[in-house]
Image (cartoon, helix red, strand yellow):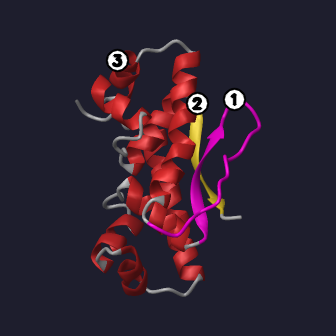
Amino acid sequence: MVLRVNAAAQRRLNAIQGQLLAARLAAKMSQEALGEVLGVTSRSLRDWEKHYDSPSLGHAFDWAQRLGFRLALADRLVEATAFPVEVKHHHIWQMQEYRLLAPFLKARRRARKISQTDLGLIVGVTRSTLQRWEDGEQFPRLIGLIVWADRLDYSVELQPLL
């Protein structure tokens, strides 16, 4: 299956990547320095910033956190913002961050009585992939999270760390 990325999801991804580029520049941090902190090459970071590629969700969590942000869900149907949690600076915090997002998406799917198979077809992934995303066994790529959230009337946003 092929992830069904529409123009709105691509614009959202580009906006997030653009915000992170602006934050890096405002922090007067070089691509080399940030890449070293993130454990990626400066070329990878350049490709993300120029929208040639998108980071994995784990790298997106790290990239945002290193620049003072976190990824959060904003419910487009009600006036609500992110679901905050204390950020711990070790590898497990990526899973903690992800577990702030996936349960809301799973709950929205269930509330709308949409099966994993049907939502998978809408998103462009298999039922088992969607199940692994919902259960936190596998992270989608950042664009995958954006598409998944969008299909359930959420928007993925950057939120300043508290």
First in sequence, mark 1 or 2: give its number: 1
Dominant secondary-structure state across the stretch colored magenta: loop
Q: At label 1, which amino acid type do we have?
A: Leu
Q: Quadrant of residue 69?
A: bottom right
Residue 75 at x, y percent in the picture:
66, 36
Q: Are marks 1 and 2 in contact (CB under 8 Å)?
A: yes
- Image point (74%, 40%), residue name: 80
Give whichever of discs 1 and 3 has the lower sequence position: 1
Looking at the image, which residue is at 31% across and 59% down?
53
What distance separates the C-alpha of mark 1 from that of mark 3? 24 Å
Q: Which mark is residue 77?
A: 1
Q: Position of residue 45 (x, y in %)?
A: 36, 72
The residue segment tinted magenta is 68-90
Distance, label 1 to label 2, CA atoms, is: 7 Å
Any mark on residue 117, and which?
A: 3
Say which residue label 2 marks: 153
Please, is residue 71 above or below residue 20 in the view? above
Q: Is 132 inside the magenta-drawn segment?
A: no
Q: Is 73 a magenta residue?
A: yes
> In the image, what residue occupies the spot 39% across and 62% down?
59
- 10 Å neighbourhood of mark 1: few (<14), some, or many (≥20)? few
| Residue type of the residue flagged with mark 2 | Asp
